[in-house]
Amino acid sequence: MSDQKQRVFSGIQPSGNLTIGNYLGALKNWVAVQQENENFFCIVDLHAITVPQDPKVLAEKIREVAAIYLAVGLDPRHCTIFRQSAVPGHTELAWLLNCVARFGELSRMTQFKDKTVRGGSDSASAGLFTYPVLMAADILLYNADLVPVGDDQRQHLELSRTIARRFNHTYGETFVVPKPMILSAGARVMGLDDPTVKMSKSAGSPGHYIAILDEPDVIRKKVRRAKTDSGSEVTATADKPAITNLLDIYSATTGRTIPELEDEYEGRGYGDLKRDLGDAVAEALAPIRTRALELLSDPAELDSLLAAGSEKAREASAPVLRDARSRMGLG
Ligand code: TRP
């Protein structure tokens, strides 16, 4: 065993408002293990433009994600924080891998099918279709060993592994085949208005999600208005998806176990649970919000931090890209 650190790569799209789902399901856990690994945390702006974005809003959202990465406690000494579009290797490798991935494989991606049920695939951008190949390029470009992803990205990560193996088999050993990183405390947060769908930052009304940058009073109000189940007992059971979701959020926010919380609310109603949960979430997010707003008040400083991250990312990825090109005869 060498004590070389494992490479970790992950990314979040700068679209919509980052939610407590991004925090509890991803960011909080990235912070917890950041010192054990060598991390690349990307702001995947090229993925965001696979669906239409307002250019001005996008530019703001990119900084906002950077500010949130820092405000939750990601430390540039352990993490390279950068934007995808600032490192041209992502698009270049994506093209090479587009010629390795197969049309049929991309056709089977459930996220593409889900995102195009309503509008039909004919009018979807070609970028939305090849989105998983760009994601493979993100990961393979850094020889990442581990990729923390939620359930909804499992299939994309599996495709990245297939592409890496196929490339290695065809052109010779080039890429590390990445593994999913299982985050022990990772919570899967569902919508406040509909506990059957994952909380999303780009869908639904504001009552659907809690944004990381929501004001404390807004958070309390959203929790108060969250959907509940019939009955009155505070238990995490299959017939109570809404209360289960609230308890999951409570548990992930405070570190207290579900049985502990069920005990505490025994004989009390949903109202008590919501009041305390609202307070707990508001309290947990308040310092993050304050710090993020502070960082956002100095855009030049954020931009220079991102520039430094991009420089490091370019350096780390250049040899891998060179190798992939030359293996394909493009040296
Ligand atoms: N597709 C991912 C998502 O929407 C974001 C992403 C892009 C990503 N590139 C990545 C995640 C590479 C992990 C690794 O959640």
Image (tube, rainbow, N blue to C red):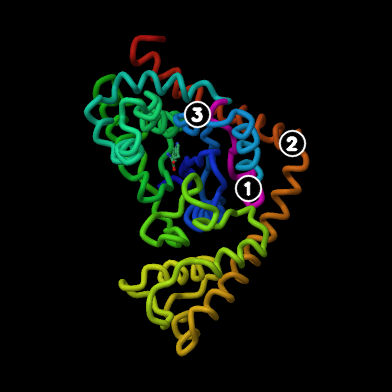
Picture layout, residue 58 above or below residue 212: above
The image shows residue 74 at horizontal and vertical percentages of 61, 49
For the residue carrying disc 3, how many other residues have a C-alpha within 10 Å: few (<14), some (14-19), or many (20+)? many
The image shows residue 134 at horizontal and vertical percentages of 41, 28
Q: Earlier in the sequence, mark 1 or mark 3?
A: 3
Residue 131: which quarter of the image? top left
- In the visual, does 165 lie left or right of 47? left
Residue under numbered circle 2: 299
- The region drawn magenta spans 69-85
Q: Residue at x 39, y 13 (%)?
A: 326
The image shows residue 113 at horizontal and vertical percentages of 29, 37
Give the farthest residue toward the top. 330
Give the farthest residue toward the left. 104
Using the rendered image of the protein, determine whether residue 186 is visible from the camera's viewpoint: no
Mark 3 C-beta closer than 8 Å to ligand 1: no
The image shows residue 6 at horizontal and vertical percentages of 46, 44
Q: Amino acid at mark 3?
A: Leu
Q: Residue at x 56, y 53 (%)?
A: 31
For the residue carrying disc 2, how many other residues have a C-alpha within 10 Å: few (<14), some (14-19), or many (20+)? some
Q: Amino acid at mark 2?
A: Pro
- In the picture, the disc for residue 277 is none
- In the picture, the disc for residue 68 is 1
Q: Quadrant of ligand 1?
A: top left
